[in-house]
Every structure is written in structure tokens, then in C-alpha cells.
Image: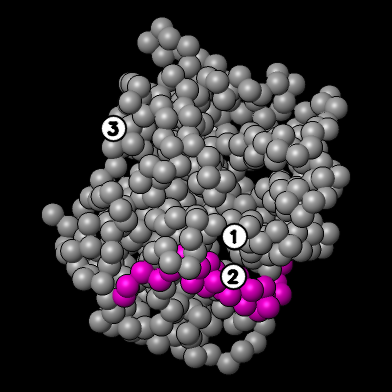
Amino acid sequence: MKNLTSIIGICGVALITLLSSCKDEFLDKVPYDAIPFDDALLTEDDMQAALNGVYSNMLGSGLYGRTVPIMGDLLADNVYISSANTGRYIPFNTYAIFDDNGDVDGVWSSAYYAILNANQVISADLPANANVNQMRGEAYAARGMMYFDLVRIFAKPYNADNINSAGVPIVLTYQPEIKPARNTVGEVYAQAVSDLTTAISLMTEEKNSEYISKYVAVGLLAKVYQYMGDWENAKTQSLDLINNGGYSLVDSADFVSFWADPGPSELSETLFELRMDIAVNNGFNSLAAMYDDAVYGDALVDSNFYNSYSDADVRKQLMFEAELSGEPIVRVNKYPNSSNTSDYDDIKIIRLAEVYLILAEAYYHLGDEGNALTYLNAIAQQREPSFEGYTSSGETLLNDITNERRKELAFEGNRVFDLNRLGLDINRGPQFPSDALFIPISDYRRLMPIPLYEINANPAMVQNPGY
């Protein structure tokens, strides 16, 4: 049984570790660089250690290391769980999700532990200098990212009712006995915008893709504005990154090798990825293990989705046809290094290609279909050089942008959140469970439940309807 203590409350009083009383695998790991919360950060080295804790929390299999990206595709229509499975993530496949689901618990607790570490860095009482500002900026950006993803997972979309709808609790300071209520969706988005804007103002150091830097925060802020439907600001931030960030799209000839390379890059297409190497990795609990038939190989590609790619589209090479028990299947090959004992697949959080598509969607909503097509085709023709380009307009153009996002960002955890923010029903292919083929936008299961232990431990916490 779980310890009936609010994770948010724990984040106000406990060490920056994960509780041994929680028996789920995502709670069994203690970051090697964890330090007590109530120990003051006296030096820049202390501050860096706490910041390392933020990255360590994000990398865990309960968050971006596996659950969040698999959730984003499996709850939608891109991948399904094979009938010959190892028992992982079946409730997401069948939409039989309850408030004691361990994977949902893991997202909640891992995100709030990351927020705890970020708060510690942000509140460190050290004199400002370029290095301190950089670290504090990275922490602000990470905290903004946590709140953005928490509100996407556990609350209604911004455009549904951001004023009255319950979001998630916002915790910004050390508060030992805190049992907070849920802030509104609008307040959580405002916090994410504030954190990312502050981060941009603080960071000056250019780093490789395994660290948050100024333009990583710019790209994340563009994405937050996209989900808010603030198209003018989404355009402004996207253009800033594309014109000034120094990043470039990967050529079609190099696209497959780009994904096969497990290491970080400098000013290539990847803005930010969480590093996995021989010393720090999730092993059998990695995202890659869910796709690799040499490990679990439970997650398979919906064949209708696979067939939506042209054979000339280089992205189709990141999947391959195979057989399982004599039946044809399609496997993902976007993470091919799960058996590479010297290096592993990094988890890509945001890429330049996504920013191009954010900008295309922003231009569409601002009535500039010419520029929307320009940035949409920049991706589509880069991935398929023989493609003559989209020429659509109106609602068809928006559908093309949405479908191109699906193709480009497949297996990176975005699909269900796109469908939610766009107010679209989920229509799954016949390879999904027969009783979970159609999930309308009105279905309460489009939001994840607040973990039961939070409900039991915190009288101010309100559960999502239906659970």
C-alpha cells in the first residue's frame, strides 16, 4: 500500500530523494546527486548538484524517460500494445485507467520532485553572476515545462475553460505543511509562461542539446502559446528561434542516421534532449525497450498510420514491417540503441521541426496561409524531397498541418495532447482493443486522474470528474 502522504507535501519537507515506501519501479531510484532540501545551497557547486537533480528527475522512467512519451502515442492512435505483451501500459491501451494507476502516479510524483529541485535552485541565495543566472534560468525553464505537462495531462485544454477549470497545484516556495488546492488551468499556463519568460532573460550560455539553454526556453514558450491559442506570441517566439537560434533541419539523407546517433548535438535539429549514456540510463525501463523486440517490444505501430506515409518519405524508414506469431506487424525503429551498452537513445524533448510546424499553425490562425504553407512544406519536402508540396487552404490546410505534426512527431509523445487541444475525437484502428476504438473528446478519460494518494492525503485536492 502506498504511504498516504501528499507528494506535494513531501516536496516541502523531505530530502530530494524518492520514498522507499513507494514500491513502484519509478520510485525505487535515488538520484546519485540528490541533496537534502533543508541544506542551504552555499556554493555554485551546490547549486549545480541541485540542478543535476532536476535533469535526473526528468530522465526517470516515470516521466520523460518512458511514461510521458509512450502515453502521448498510446492514448491516441499511433501505437497499440501487442497481444503478446509483458503487461506494461495495458490500461492506456484499453482506456481502463483508474485513480490508483501506478504509471499515472509516477508522472505526478516525478514531476513534483523535479519542481522541488527546481525551486531549490531558483531560491538559492547566491550572488548573481553569469553562471548562477544560467543555472537559475535552466531551473525556471524546467519548472515551466513541468507545469505545462502536468496541466496537459491532468486538466482540460486551455481553450475549454481556463478560468474555471481545475488545473494542478502551483508550488513555488518551501512550505513544510502545504496541502494546496488545484490552481485553475489559466493560472498554471500563466505560471509556465512566466517561468519560461524569466528563464529566457537569465540564460546566456550556449550548450549542447542535453542542457536547457535560452533558445530551448524560447521553443518551449512557443509551444505553450500554441496550446493557449495565443497565435501572435507563438509566431513571435517561433520566428525568434528559427531566425536567431542557429539551429538547422536535418537533411533527408541524414535523417535516419540522426536518430541512430545516441549522442548530444550542438545547434543541430534537436533543441533539447535528455541524455542517456553508459553511466546514467533507464536500462530495461527505457522508452526504447517498449519498442525494441530484443527487450519488450510491446508497443507496435498502427498499420493505418504506417500506410499513411509515402514510400519516398524518409520518416517511414524509422519503422519496419515484421511478423509476430505469424501475423504482420510494424515496429518502431526511432530508438535503435537499447542494446548499445556504450551509449543509449536520448529522449528528444523538442526539435526545430516542431517549431516550424508551430509557426505554420500560427500563421494559419493569423490568416496568412502563404506563410503557413511555406513552413509546413519546409518540413514535408525536407522529409520527402520528391513531394511537390501542399497547396491546400482553409480547413484542409489546418488538417494538413495536424497530419504533418502526427507524422513528424510520432513516437515522441505529442499526439494525444494535440487531439485534446484541437477538440478532436480519437478514432483508433482495428488493431486496438475493440471496446476502445472510439474515445470522444467528451470522454472523461481524456484527462488522467489525480492520484488516489493525493486525494486521500489532501482534503483540498479535487478529483477529475468520472474517477
For residue 51, side relative to residue 366 (left or right):
left
**Image height of 95 relative to 192, above or below:** above
Asked whether residue 10 is in view, the answer is no
Give the secondary structure at mark 2: helix
* Residue position marked by numbered label 1 in the rendering: 228
What residue did someone put label 3 on? 87
Mark 1 vs 2: CB contact within 8 A: yes
Decide: is 231 above or below 78.
below
Q: Residues in magenta?
A: 180-208
Sequence-first disc among 3 and 2: 3
Which numbered disc, 1 or 2, marks the residue that appears first in the sequence?
2
Is the residue marked by circle 1 packed among few (<14), some (14-19), or many (20+) residues within 10 Å? Answer: some
| Residue 371 on the magenta segment | no
Residue 411 horizontal side relative to residue 80, left or right: right
Locate residue 147, reporting x and y percent. Answer: 47, 65
Closer to the camera in the image, 293 or 228:
228
In three-dimensional space, the C-alpha distance between marks 3 and 1, rounded to whole angstroms, equals: 36 Å
**Residue at numbered disc 2:** 193
Q: Mark 3 or mark 2: which is in front?
A: 2
Reading the chain from its start, which is encountered first: label 3 or label 1?
A: 3
Residue 406 visible within the image: yes
Q: Is residue 371 above or below residue 10?
A: above
